[in-house]
Image (tube, helix red, strand yellow):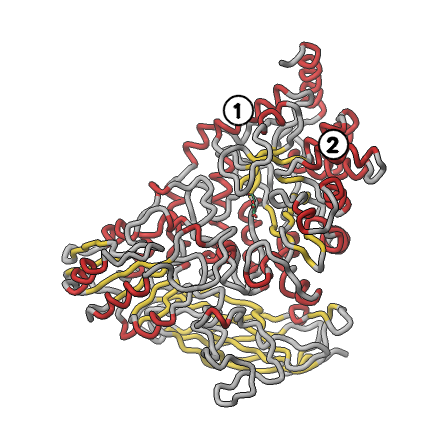
Amino acid sequence: MIKQKQMYIITLFVLTLMWILPAFPIINAGVEQDPEIIEKIDSLLTIMSLEEKLGQMTLVSSSFTPTGPVLRDDFKQLVREGKAGGIFNAFGAEYTRQLQQIAVEETRLGIPLLFGLDVIHGYRTIFPIPLAEAATWDPDLIEKASETAAAEAAASGVHWTFAPMVDVTRDPRWGRIAESAGEDPFMNSVFARARVRGFQGDDLNKLNTILATAKHYAAYGAAEGGRDYNTVDISERVLREVYLPPFKAAWDEGVRTFMTAFNEYDGVPATGNRFLLNSILRDEWGFTGFVVTDYTSIPEMVTHGAAVDTAAAAAMALHANVDMDMQAVVYLEKLPGLLKEGRISEKQIDNTVRRILYTKFELGLFDDPYRYSDTGREEETILNQDFLGTALEVAKKAIVLLKNEDQLLPLSDDIEKIAVLGPLADDNFHPLGSWRAAGRREDTVTLIQGLNNYISDKTEIVHIRGVDFRDTSKEGFKEAVELARDSDIAIVAVGEEADMSGEAASRATLILPGVQEEFLKEIYETGTPVVMILMAGRPLQITWANDNIPAIVNAWFLGTQTGNAIAEVLFGHYNPGGKLPVTYPAEVGQVPVYYYHKNTGRPKDPDYRFTSKYIDAPTSPLYPFGYGLSYTTFSYDDLKLDKNVLTPDDTLHISVSVTNAGKFEGDEVVQLYTRTLAASVTRPVKELRDFKRITLAPGETTTVDFFLHPSQLRFYDSGMNYGLESGTIKVLVGTNSIDVLVAEFELELK
Ligand code: BGC
């Protein structure tokens, strides 16, 4: 019960706030802080008790969809007592309004709550998983997708997404590869920027933008053996050149929050790692936003063996300038004691509260705490036709054609009977992938529904599931085989279940789960041409299928518009042009296998034993990074550099002529790589520098231009200085990371 006197203070305070806080100036994304907001925060800090400050530093889950142990299920009580500044896993205009009401009306100061949620690839309109979004190689489109997700989430009371995940990952066993832009630092940086722009827009005060989070800082994707939460042990050079650039890119784009990672870096858990958080993030990069921990990662530092108890862990985190404690409630419980003992200072607490409150001001929550929780706007916004249109465009562009022998695809309208088989043929749940926020299975267009939407009058579709995901029963095989035998084409949709990728979903094998491959083999043996549709959150080892099945379509998890997107591709309404943002191994034992590797002193040579390879596996991966086919073919000619010698102040103009040599209009992703041949430290055999997705009509030729500035060629030298060295640089341009035209120039420093 709120006492009368308290009520009076609240009213007085709110009125005062309304008076002293007129519509504050809008600030652009970036590093500039608004002094007026800082002033308001400072005056607020003077009247906040220690407990109220610690409350702002505490983020707790509602009971919706937690991803770990719920340590406190009394979250409403915490809010009521002013001991929680943010709630995550709460969404929906009505529900968030109710919770906000508790904070605003029942606490002494009425400071509004911040609502966070994992809006990873859509809110209600679900887009392809992030790995698939990267397969579009179309960052502008993914910016639009993130904008859509932000608009829906913001209309449902959500202020803050825990995205983008910008962890580079070279190990497909790691389930969270599904959430990344793949194996390359440049790709991850480009998509990090696009997503931050999409979520945050140019003005956080607008009602269709939300705060973004660059996560998981840092090097989470380098978990040993691809096992989630596992130890990371990489050099500082690899950290800086491979794992950090996407985080820096996100901050350059003005991302407001960072989330720490579960793993350790160089023996110190990321959540208490002063090198990562203070030296790099704050001092080198000048990050001014706030840092939230990952789920209970402060107390986990005790389990790591990096702190003797949770109090020591809390001190570690605070000394590393970690601002918000997700779900552990240890800041609230332990910081008062630490303060008394003089192990931390009130100034440190004030600094973090300042950073958190700043974002609440930016979102306009002090003007109107309920502005995001509007049921009318929610209803108008959610799943609107434009959003569904964007989701379809992304889904189509994300599809990667892996194989198409004898142009089996696209399917002709004259086919009489198609058998549609497999566990993903009529499934509306798994194609949404992991982290589907408010996504609902009933909104998903299944493959069967999509085929029916696009099928010609002459064609009949018959569906039998035939096989399960993991269940090893073969009972359904016979009927499916008979149907396939009796059909002109068999479309077989196989792959993983949604929860086989994402968090805590590492796999030791990369094979199709259960008896799906055996099923595929039996259907293949009928002699009916087979089109395999692969849905999964990661690269799978589909070596047998690649050797035998004539057509393979990689459809990842494509979200709400799954069936329509695949059907458009199968029937030739859309010519697929996606490319792999990650290498597909031929054998799991090849992992880690990625294009950006070093040459070694003995590069692989299948004909010579004493070279770097396995004696019992192919020397090449199944599909290289950047790979993907089309219904047409593209030819590359005339790779030209405008100079042979490049100096640091100049720019290299690279051009190449690309021709659509086939009969269909189609998209091609033209990729630019470089290779530094010799330097004080060895460099990778290829580094992606730029790319362009273009559309060409049959027979059309175009010139694609790239401009390479020497600053793009910098690296850490043997003394860890970031800069350039003179030498020969190869330029490689092509349709994937293997099939390239090559030229070279000299980089000369004077
Ligand atoms: C995940 C984060 C996520 C958080 C909140 C954690 O388990 O690692 O990526 O944002 O939960 O749901």
Disc 2 or disc 1, which is closer to the eye? Answer: 1
CA gap, disc 2 and disc 1: 25 Å
Side of 180 where 442 appears, left or right:
left
Residue 353 at x, y percent in the picture: 72, 35
Q: Which label number is shown at residue 41?
A: 2
Q: The residue under label 2 is which amino acid type?
A: Ile
The residue at the far right in this view is: 342
- Quadrant of residue 711 in the image? bottom right
* 10 Å crowding of disc 2: few (<14), some (14-19), many (20+): some
- Quadrant of residue 6 in the image? top right
Q: Vertically, is 363 above or below 136?
A: above
Q: Is residue 428 visible?
A: yes
Mark 1 secondary-structure assignment: helix
Side of 329 where 521 appears, left or right:
left
- Quadrant of residue 74 in the image? top right
Looking at marks 2 and 1 on the same chain, the residue that comes earlier in the sequence is marked by: 2
The residue under the point 14% across, 63% down is 486
The residue under the point 64% across, 30% down is 84
Q: Nearer the viewer, residue 327 or 515?
A: 515
Q: Which label number is shown at residue 98?
A: 1
Q: Nearer the viewer, residue 101 or 419?
A: 419
The residue under the point 57% across, 22% down is 101
